[in-house]
Image: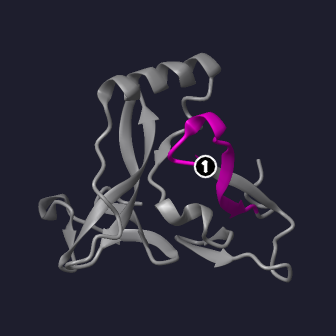
Amino acid sequence: MTPDEKLVEFGNVTTPWLVPEANGNSVFGGKVVPRSWAYSSGHLYPIEFGFNPPSVENFLSVSFNQDFVRELYELLVGLGIEDLVGLTVLDDGIHDAPFGVEKTVGRVSITLPITPETEPSEAVESVWTFGCHERMDDSKLWPARICWVCQGCKK
């Protein structure tokens, strides 16, 4: 991607969009909003974005408590996975939605529904969420996103 591009999700498609810095986060009359973050040199940076068309708020603006960001980074460093784990915003309906699988072709990623006929044999869970937003004591980890892994991508 170029410095002026952002990886933007709209519907079931994620692709690089040209979002010049001078425009801020405005494009096509709507807003591009961060939805996934990764750590780099101890700082949390947005890496994936969602698109809110004019007068629609599909993706909420999020700010993180800086103590949480620092403590999470320290935990990840202690586990040796600071380059593997980040944060993402998931819709509250994620547990009720049918499972999908993300397939990337070139510069475009598409989330496809999984059915017994289309379930890929080479797939990995890549995003997880905790269930039960009201009581964490009986919460469990749920797969939230599955990525289709082609043989050329496995390393």
Can you say whether 53 is above or below 126 in the image? Answer: below
Residue 56 location, quadrant: bottom left
Q: Is residue 59 magenta?
A: no
x, y percent for residue 55 = 20, 78
Q: Residue at x 36, y 60 (%)?
A: 2
Q: Secondary structure at mark 1?
A: loop
Report the residue marked by disc 1.
Answer: 131
What is the tally of numbered marks visible in this picture? 1
x, y percent for residue 106 = 58, 72
Q: Residue at x 68, y 69 (%)?
A: 99
Side (left or right) of 93 relative to 80: left
x, y percent for residue 96 = 61, 68
Q: Residue at x 77, y 61 (%)?
A: 152
Residue in the foreground of this view, choosing between 52 and 23: 52
Q: Which residues are magenta?
A: 129-149
Can you say whether 67 is above or below 30 in the image? Answer: above
Q: Residue at x 55, y 29 (%)?
A: 82
Three-letter code for the amino acid on which mark 1 is drawn: Gly
Can you say whether 90 is above or below 58 in the image? Answer: above
In this view, which residue lies farthest toward the left?
22
x, y percent for residue 146 = 69, 60
Q: Is residue 131 magenta?
A: yes
Side (left or right) of 58 relative to 86: left
